[in-house]
Image (cartoon, rainbow, N blue to C red):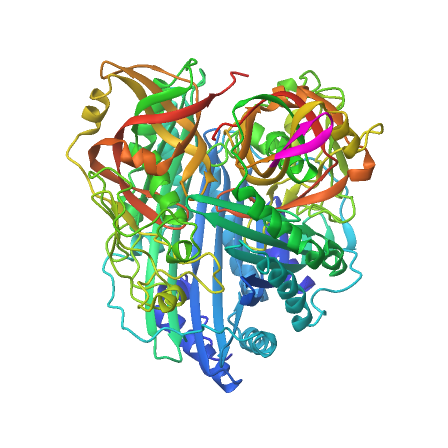
Amino acid sequence: MRDLTSRALDTATALGATYADVRVVRRLEESINVKSGRVEGVAGGESEGFGVRVVVDGAWGFAASHRLSTAEADRIAAEAVRIAKASATAIREPVVLADRPAAYGRFETEVAEDPFAVPMDQKIGDLLAADRAMNAVAGIAWTESLYAAQREWKTFAATDGSYTEQVITHLGAGLEANAVDGDEHQRRSYPDNGGSWASAGYEFVRGLDLLGNAERTASEAVELLSAPPLPAGTRTIILHPSQLYMQVHESCGHPTELDRALGSEASYAGTSFLTPDMLGSFRYGSDLCDIVADATVPGGLGTFGWDDEGVAAQQVPLIKEGMFVGYLSSRETAPRIGRTSGGAMRADGWNRIPLIRMTNVNLLPKPGMTFDQIVADTDDGLLFETNRSWSIDDRRLNFQFSTEMCREIKGGKPGKLFRNGTYTGITYELWRSMDAIGDASSWQMWSTPNCGKGEPGQAGHVGHGVSGARFRNVRVGVVA
Amino acid sequence: MSALHDATGERGMGGDPESALRLAEDVIEKAQAAGAGEAEALVVAGTSALTRFANSQIHQNVASTEVFVNLRFVVGRRVAVASSGRADADGIRALVDRAATIAANVEELEDWAGLPDADAASPVPGAWSDATADASPELRAEGARAVIAAADAAGVTAFGSYSTDAESVAVASSKGIRAAERRTSAQLLTVTMGPDNGTGYAEQVAVDASAIDADAIGREAAERARASANPTDIEPGDYPVVLHSYAVVDLVDMLGYLGFSALAVQEDRSFWEAGRQVASPLITLVDDGRESGLPAAFDAEGVPKQRLRLLDRGACADLAYDSQTAARAGRRSTGHGLPAPNTFGPFPINMSMAAGDTSFDDLVAGLDRGLLVTRFHYTNPVHQKRAIITGMTRDGTFLVEGGEIVRPVRNLRFTMSYLDALANVQAVGADRRCVRGFLGASVVPSLRLSSFSFTGATAAG
């Protein structure tokens, strides 16, 4: 591998690059989809290639190819330099990269039971058993169950001598039951809409106990069909961890991406209401709100040894006691706010440039109340569970979410079930209204394996640790 | 080197569909030798490049050379799928081995109807442009500079991207399918921002990059950003609206996803019923892979694309089928399959809404008091069967009174059934634009609607 990486870096340097890095990535994937008790699709995929990123005349260029050869390394390095020179015809501020220690070493996801070594018939059997158990529940229209795993071997080398090797394994699984009556369609998922994912081995899937949760999941889908729609109003709401992580993702994770705040994503995903002048002075949430980007936490989809420009994994405070204090950042963006990179540059494969992405953006638990005690402490409220849909504006202020389950809390006890529950609001108004947060007993990592960003598009794998929380005076029931 | 025809040269296989087809044939021969009773290979090979700009300077600039090989390997009723990003002999050997291993372990599909039969697709004229295939980083930079210059002239800042893609697509199967063609696409889009919170948008999509008019795109977006400066609040509620083509594309894309897929109907999660009147009689929506959007002669299964009349004067008519959903319905595929394994179902990706006879200015002039919406942002279904969608307005929302634009307003959240939206159409624009959607590109006019539900306002913060 060093032959190819050295050749690419040498060629880029000889052609005028003042900085260059190269990533060689091989990705192995497998997936199983079961629909209504039958195996609908089993697939295995492999891809490999390399990408060369250069700075020439203060401008960026990037080129990538699937052909792994030194001759192709020459061609691609030269193409990257040519592209950078074209970029240099339209720059106003040359690229400046924050210093970082040269990176050396190896990182590997901790895997107890290699998912690619578990026999395929066993993995199919586990999924089929759970899916068929859902199908056995009266009133179910169709079911869908999924399993997927991905492993990447990634080598990074840069002109400062950095050279790292990483082997990162992600996998996920989940169930979905659907019930239909006329115009009404209700879906119930376990453990999450689209499955639950982790950086782990097959032991994670076994731990989900899909079969043990299948009948309950399907029964709740049927129960939702006859539930009344959620009436409009302003209520106290409790967000179960299965919804709270999405609230963190959309209304804290994305607006704290420094490239968004500086305008780099304006033409696609948008910008951020959290501008650099607000650092340290803007009250984002209540005193209970501590949010940290942590690329070191075990099991998260945003856990690694080094980011894709060789910056070591670290913990970066974003919100501290409710105040906005930090960004997810890169070597190029961090100097613009007088900081060093927080190590958040991640690329979706060899053929994409690294972008600032969430790592694991975690809402920290607080000692004092368990999640169940928060429910018991709520006289009149609504409990929203499992994300169903999401939408937020291009500055990440105005959000609207719907969940699969919405249950009324009366006198501290869960009661009436509503269907099509929605809530909406403004990001900082919601977080400032948070008056209770669960302790560590309900805190766990959740995941978003399909976070879209960038042009050309990239799908990011990011994590979120949450424990559940309560919010006051929130508008609910937008659509009955 | 095996046969694998990983052609050299600037375009690689991207300009040589015959090489892509030979690779597909080679893969199915190896699959059959490994025990497949039926085999199908899809090859997509080409180059993609994109120049991105922000704060009126190029900040990202990329190009890649890629190949994708997707193999369906069938033994009896056992169906396996394997894919690879490698075209070398070892990579293809590993691909076939992986597929064979999966096939040995999967259960039989009781209703497997076999791979689709051969039905020759005649070539589509206009799917390929040498100008796009040969587009250089210098050409894309020139386009970016033209947009930036228009923004500078208007005192606003430009953000956007200019992409050029060229690919060869080939499908070969043991049923005798041999389909191959080359396709190109180019897209220039820009968001412009002014110092007083004004934003604008413009976009052009074409097969031929030489048709992209960067100056015009830059001016259109810059003018919109200037016009939307200093937006003020407006109360959410139901308003008559004019939706620009950039917004209308989201309506047809969402309805394509939620309703016009045969799988959605078979799973009873679609609004579609034959003959059901769901939209105004002014609305006719077709899908035509041969003529509309970014043309293609065949789908991912190598089946020729048929023209579909999805909405005929507001009534549900045709549905998009792939081979599996077609077999369940006892009919032939319409050529709308996606690459296997596809639990998503078939999808119309070349939609076109019939033009009306009202100019854009007259659409706006017909609003007594209403809103002009440039585009939507981050839309998502709230209720699938009723096609209720929520999302935000973006990049130019204006209050219209007495047929005249009177002021820009802050972005609004809407929550609205897209079926009700199309039922409320009062007038259809005479001019249409090709706008990029989820998976393809659609040709759509602007529309005037009698009512659209805005359910939330944006904070100024």
Q: Nearer the viewer, residue A467 or B458?
A: A467
Residue at 57 percent across and 52 percent down: it is A177
Q: Main secondary structure of the magenta part?
A: strand
The quadrant holding residue B321 is bottom left
Q: Is residue A270 visible?
A: yes
Q: Position of residue A13 (x, y in %)?
A: 60, 50
Residue B330 magenta-highlighted: no
Quadrant (top left, top right, bottom left, bottom right) of the N terminus of chain A: bottom right
The quadrant holding residue B369 is top left
- Point out the stretch of residues depicted in magenta: A406-416
How many marks on residues? 0
Q: Nearer the viewer, residue B322 or A376?
A: A376
Q: Position of residue A332 (x, y in %)?
A: 63, 35
Residue at 56 percent across and 37 percent down: it is A58
Residue A407 magenta-highlighted: yes
Q: Position of residue B202 (x, y in %)?
A: 34, 33
Above or below, A478 against B204 in this view is above
Q: Position of residue A108 (x, y in %)?
A: 77, 56
Q: Nearer the viewer, residue B432 or A16?
A: B432
Residue at 39 percent across and 43 percent down: it is B254
Residue B73 falls left or right of residue B422:
right
Residue at the right extreme of this rendering = A367
Residue at 44 percent across and 80 percent down: it is B38
Residue A161 falls left or right of residue A448:
right
Residue at the left extreme of this rendering = B357
Q: Is residue B7 visible?
A: no
